[in-house]
Every structure is written in C-alpha cells, then in structure tokens.
Image (cartoon, grey):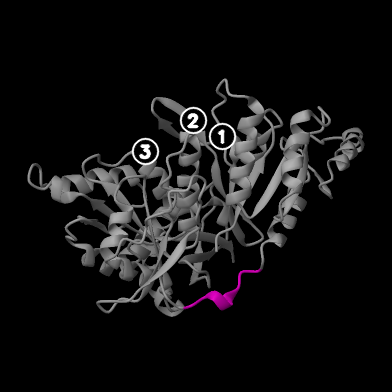
Amino acid sequence: MGNIVAIVGRPNVGKSTFFNRMTESRHAIVDSTSGVTRDRHYGQVVWNGRDFTIIDTGGYIINSDDIFEEEIRKQVILAIEECDVILFLVDVTNGITDLDETIATLLRKIDKPVMLVVNKVDNPGRAYDANVFYKLGLGELYNVSSINGSGTGDLLDEVVGLFQKEDEIEEEDLPKIAVVGRPNVGKSSLINSLIGEERNIVTPVSGTTRDSINTRYSKFNHDFFLVDTAGLRKKSKVKEDLEFYSVMRSIRAIESSDVCLLMLDATIGIESQDVNIFHLIEKSKKGVVVLVNKWDLIEKETGSVKSFEEVIRRKLEPFVDIPIVFVSALTKQRIHKALEEVIKVYENRKKRIPTSQLNEVMQEVIQANHPPAEKGKYIQIKYVTQLPTRSPSFAFYCNLPQYIKDPYKRYLENKIRQNFNFTGVPIQIYMRKK
C-alpha cells in the first residue's frame, strides 16, 4: 500500500524548501484552476529502497480573506484524514507562535504518528534554541536545515521506519487495477458498466470520506481487483478541499494498484492535469492504459482515431509505448478490449527476461551504437541483468557509469522495448560500476 506523508505548519516556516529538499525537485507541479495558477505540491520520495508520496498541504489553501486560522485548521484536518505520517514543521528563528500552538493542539488528539520538525537549525546556538519546542508536547524533536539538508537523513530514516514493513501476506496474487483521471471524465460510469450495478453512490452526508475500496471483478475469464477511489460526491463549500481530495484519491489509487486506467474525455481532449496524473503513474512505476472515454460523441464528426492518438502521444513524451483505447463507458463500446490491454500490461510489468537472452540481444544493440566517449575515455558496457524489483528495471555494468547520459539510456530503453515488449510499463535503467 502506498504511504502518504503530509507536511503541515503555518506559512513561512519553509515548507516549500523542505518539500523540495525531500523530493530533490526544484519545482512544484502547477495546474490551473479557473485562471488561478496554484502549486500542486506532491512528489515521490525514495529512501532506503522504500518510496512514498509526500504532500505539502500549504499548496492547497488559497489565503482568501478567510480567517487564517480557519484555513490552517482545514489543512491540518485534511492531512489527518488522508495521510499515514504527519510532519509538523516549525521555525526555530520564530520560537513558538500562537498558530503553532493551535496546530499542536489538533495534532495531540490524533493517533497517527506526528513528527515535530524544527527547521532552520543550522548552527549549535539554534540547536539549543530548538529545545523550546518540547513545550508543544509532541515528543521528540527533529532538527533540520532545509537549505543545507542537515538532519534530513535521520528524519527520513525515522519516517521510513514508521511504515509497517509492507506485508507480503496481503499479496493476493490478483492484479489491482485503478481507474484514475480528472473529475467527471466518467470513472464511475466505467466502474458501474464493468460491475453492472450502481455501487459508487456515496451517502450524501457532508464530510464523509472513503478510502479506496477494492471490488473483485471476475467475469469473462478475467479476475482482478478494481481499486475504486471515486468517493466524495458531496457538495463542498470549499472547492479547494474537493480538489485536494481528488488529488489525494488519485495518489492513493495509483499507489495501491499495479495498472492504472487513465481516463480522458474525448470531448475535451488531453489537458495538463491529465498529463500530471500520467507522470505520477509513471513516477510510481505502475502500468498504464489510456482510455479515451465518450468516443461515441465524437466519432460521427471527426472520427480520426489516428490524429487523436498522435496528439496524446505527443503530450505524454518521452514515455509513449502505451496502449490507447477509445471507449464509451455508457454504451460499453470496446470496454472488453480495454480490459484485455490492462491484463497484457499487467503481465508485461511482471515479465522477467533471462540474463543470457538479455545479454545476447543487448550486446548486439550496444555493438551497433556504443555510448559516446566522454573526456577522451572509452566507455564499455560489459553485462546487463534485470533487477528483482516489482516493476522492470535493468542494471548495465560498465567501467564509467557516471559518463553515460540520458539520451543513451533512452536508446537502451527503446531497444529493450522493441525486443521484449514492455508496452504500458515504465522501465528503469541503472548504470552500475563493473
């Protein structure tokens, strides 16, 4: 199950810098909501071989003239409901403020792990000043400096230690398929068409949230779990919350699946938010099939599947080796074709290539096009093997791994795809010292 970690705290304590340090990214994912560009702060963190999603809740609140405290409270409540571990960030240069107190009061009441992270501790004097935060009654302090990274390693060790070692027991060997996409592209209609009953209707009680529900689907020779995160059909006073939830839901669904069905709306085409979800699937190393829904409404007019496909692939570059199926969730057109593609992608993701076969093919590929020499040094790749990971990854052993650049790695990836069929599955390529 994918773990989600939330960063909470009042403004200006350095949440964005801390987030960037954790994800080693320099940018937040941006998406435009009715003309407003807002930062979408979520990213993948990999530490000690475990990966998890980290979310900066601050990016989700528009500081309207609304009472500030109320906004922060909403943020914290969202984090509490949706995340597995909460990092509460405070700023050593300000000491304890009223808002810090307010947040601490909310966090003391919950039974999820909360870690109190004191930011901007970059000299011994500040380390001494940090002790004042013990007053908040949240236990151990973690002193870090987001700017230079000190203390973040110990913090991450601790965070990863909090996730229960993933139970291999729950690995019931059935594919887990998630249907993801922007709101209103027809995710529920698709799930209802498959299962043949309206089971996504959510109680209209304000504030109901549901985690993903797995529904077993076994008909027409298929047997898998549908990860359903449709939840939340409530009319919310706060549009932001709903949007935040739908992002959280997508992340949860992606994290807990093997293959994602990414639904697009044919009448709208592919938008930046679709592309963001796609990249999230790719970063999470899950299989993907793109479904273009509501095709029945378009076909009559334009009908050109080919040009539509080209546009999609162009937007999703460089990972374009993916199945695209044109469907209608309402008329059930080509839904079974979509399921067949999903199962193929699932099999591709589990595929293991014997080392001898892999070397036989890839040595020829390397002979045909050697990595370019760098600084007058000749690079030799001796050997390749598939790593025992959950999604396909390959290690190439060579004399100077640091000199092999991305374009060459992409060349190797494309050749692996051409020779072994990994359609719909992200591939990792690692260069290792011989």
* Residue 263 position within the rendered picture, expressed as x and y whole percent measured from the top left: 31, 52
- Is 201 placed above or below 247 here? below
Q: Residue at x 72, y 43 (%)?
A: 106
Q: Which of 113 and 152 is in front in this view?
A: 113
- Crowd around label 2: few <14 · some 14–19 · many ≥20 (10 Å): some
Q: What element carries label 3?
A: helix
Amino acid carrying label 2: it is Arg
Mark 3 → mark 1, Cα distance in angstroms: 18 Å
Q: Quadrant location of the N terminus?
A: bottom right
Mark number, residue 59: 1
Residue at left 27%, top 66%?
196
Left or right position of 114 against 243: right
Name the mark nearer the viewer: 3 or 1: 1
Residue 72 in sight: yes
Q: Which of label 2 and label 3 is nearer to you?
A: 2
Q: Residue furthest top?
A: 65
> Is label 1 in a helix, a strand or a loop?
helix
Seen from the viewer's position, the closer of residues 281 and 26 is 281
What secondary structure characterizes most of the magenta part?
loop
Give the image quarter of residue 12: top right
Q: Residue 195's mark?
A: none
Mark 2 or mark 1, which has the lower sequence index?
2
SS of the residue at dot 2? strand
- Residue 396 drawn at (x, y percent): 51, 65
Instruction: Specify start and end residues of the magenta stretch as a single range.
Output: 165-172
Residue 373 in view, yes or no: no
Which labelled disc corresponds to residue 38? 2
Which residue is under mark 3?
272
Residue contact between numbered discs 2 and 3, judged by CB atoms under 8 Å? no
- 45 vs 415: above or below: above
